[in-house]
Image (cartoon, coloured by chain):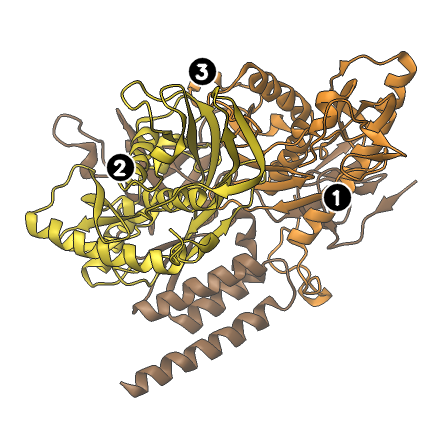
Amino acid sequence: MSYLIEKRTFVIPGDLLAEGDYHAGSNAFKEGSTVYASMVGLSNSVGRNVYVVALKGCYVPRGGDVVIGKVVEMRLGSWNVDINSPYNAILFTSEALDRPFNSRREEMTSILDIGDLILAKVISFDRTRGPALTIRESGLGKIVHGSIIRMTPSKIPRLIGRKGSMINLLTRETGCHITVGQNGLILISGKNPELEALTIKILNIIEEKAHTSGLTNRITDFIKKEKSVLNAEKSKE
Amino acid sequence: MSDSYKIVAKITKKQIADNLLKNTRIDGRGLLDYREITTEIGLLEKASGSALVSIGKTKVLAGVKVEMGEPYPDKPDAGVLTVNVELTPLASPSFEPGPPSEDAIELARVVDRGIRESKAVDLNKLCIVPGKKVFVVFVDLNVLNHSGNLFDTSALASILALMNAKTREYTVSKGGQLKYKKSTTHLPIQNFPVEVTVAKIGEKMVVDVSLEEEAVIDAQLTIAVGKDNEICAIQKSLIGTFSQDEVHQALQIATDKAKEIREKVLRGVEGWLEGKE
Amino acid sequence: MPKKAKSEKLIRRGVRTDGRKIHDLRNIKIEVGPLERADGSAYIEWGNNKILAAVYGPREVHPRHLARPDRAFFRCRYHMAPFSTTERKRPAPSRRERELSKVTRVALEPSILTKLYPRAGIDVFIEILQSDGGTRCAGITAASIALVDAGIPMKDLVAACAAGKIDGKIVLDLNEVEDQEGDADVPVAIMPRTGGISLLQMDGILSQTEFKEALELALEGCKQVYELQKEALTKAYVQEEAPVKDEEKSEGEEQNE
């Protein structure tokens, strides 16, 4: 006997996804020859792989992910970084500097202090130990200006869009620089506060409407409307 | 980890501070604007009185219970009022189950003082048999969502729950026996204190600070103002200081805001503040 | 609040003190995600019971020594607000509340895939704002929804409901008066997909047959509760807009595991 749920069906934990020769992908589990959902979301499948696009859920680090984290603790030779995941990450001084750290001559706080935000890459994570980070690559390091917005981590793919379509649209239309942390934190820095505020509004819409149809069109219309308001205000001045 | 929630990112702090210095706030409010205040009154049937107050996303539920008890030996003919606060672990990742924390105790005491010192409840009318039997009014506050400004939200929930509270009418026989009647009556409310917390950052004064803003303020004054603009209680918290001028400034702000909130939120609730008291 | 003197009957001509028939559930209303700070939350009104449940996690465990190397550490706290009862309840947790915290944990934990988050912690907080009999079942029902709302991976929901005996009859879902003056109470929780019972308690006196009848009835009640849970979740997440159309189907989703 074989069964496969229709794509994009709303499912809750325990709902039947497939029966027969199928694999349980993310947010799904298999008992005997039956695959069930383990999270609230929309069903999907690619070939024999059946999974759930989750609507809720925390960020689980994966090697190679770029994340935005907050330094929350300091130890001898390392910082503890809150990366909005069940596990705090660790950043060793050797992954923060291109040279050896001299603990007699310099303070760790002069490099990174508690409360600093960093853009970092996850080096490795296997759930037995905390994820390790690096900032020794170009573009990574301490964040010194911009606004931070939080989104549900499982909605980040929607923000990026197919082959980057959504994020490119946003960057093009608002002129803001948008750095997406896979962990649900997003850094926005723009030329002026109005455009930053507009970008934040758009991200809130994506957060709210991530699982509905016509999102790209909706966003395009929204930008057009908001920008004409902005322009009108400007010409008044 | 619970501590990491208390650390606000430095650039966020800077952004908040920069905004305040320009007389704006990250959520678009002016310095002396409250977030939206919404109230729901009498939502619990088992409590004598209840009120759910939201200021922005901060939510506090107050429940009033009136029970029979003994008076304090030094005030044999007055009823008893107690205020208790529970910072429920539902409300914030940094609240943990267990005995009340220092913060919860401070909050309870500040709210208690506003109600008590303003004589909001006429405790003398709660005496049944002097020295033996009085009514005990319990105000229990349950913080459900902590997004800043717990003082003002809790105080507002308390007074609303008291205004909502009803007790059974009774008669006392010569032998001191109490007989309840079927009818109910409001508690003897005679004042309507509103607490306003004025926070200071640099030279600026702001009201109704959000959770993120709390991380950047230097000091704050919580001021309870009664219905005739009298000051009933003040609590300075946090380690910063105020100058005398600043205190005057804060008092003015608190008085104006308290009046505004009393008019908007308290007036007319259960018929109070309309010449009934 | 239904009030009655001790001598009165709890069932008259098949009708109970609150107007229900013997196999009727009280009205149940579930709201998903009312609390903003929590990772997941739910509010339930079950008759006159009013209960909030919040979930935090998976997150780091404090104190650290409680962390388990192979799975998430799961904690529950059942607590009654002082104004939730007829007589004011002292705020500190009573022995009853501590026991109920434990049975709630045991009722919920089998549904959770704790192995996916070794060393992390998941906390469930249940706050009874108003009680009217059957708070543990209502609390468990709400907590299960809050867990889903927090995006905690689960094998199934957990739905709970009690049955009991009043005036010599087996009835569904006892209210407070019935619980206090009735003969027995049997709270039950199940994982509806497998039918596994994760909570089963009883107090009072029942014959063998009566117990079996009560259990059967409680399970029937759990199934009705499960339908309401599903309804609430669907309402909360499926908005009025049509689901994503075909042309957008693969936009921004993972292509493969």
Whole-percent x and y of residue C92?
46, 21
Amino acid type at mark 3: His
Q: What element carries label 3?
A: helix
Q: Residue at x 73, y 55 (%)?
A: A8
Q: Front-most of C29 and B19?
A: C29
Colour chain B appears in? yellow
Amino acid type at mark 2: Ile
Q: Front-most of C123 and A31?
A: C123
Q: Front-most of A166 and C13?
A: C13
**Which residue is the site of mark 3?**
C65
**Which residue is the site of mark 2?**
A114
Q: Supply the letter of whichever chain is orange.
A: C
Between the residue at mark 1 and the residue at mark 3, the CA separation in whole angstroms equals: 39 Å
- In the rendered structure, are the residues bearing label 2 and label 3 in contact, judged by CB atoms less than 8 Å apart? no
Residue A157 visible in the current orientation: yes
Q: Which of marks 2 and 1 is in front?
A: 1
**Which residue is the site of mark 1?**
C228
Question: From what the image shows, is residue A126 above or below residue B216?
Answer: above
Residue A145 visible in the current orientation: no
Between the residue at mark 2 and the residue at mark 1, the CA separation in whole angstroms equals: 46 Å
The N terminus of chain A lies in quadrant: top right
Whole-percent x and y of residue A31?
79, 30
- Provide the chain ID for the residue under circle 3: C
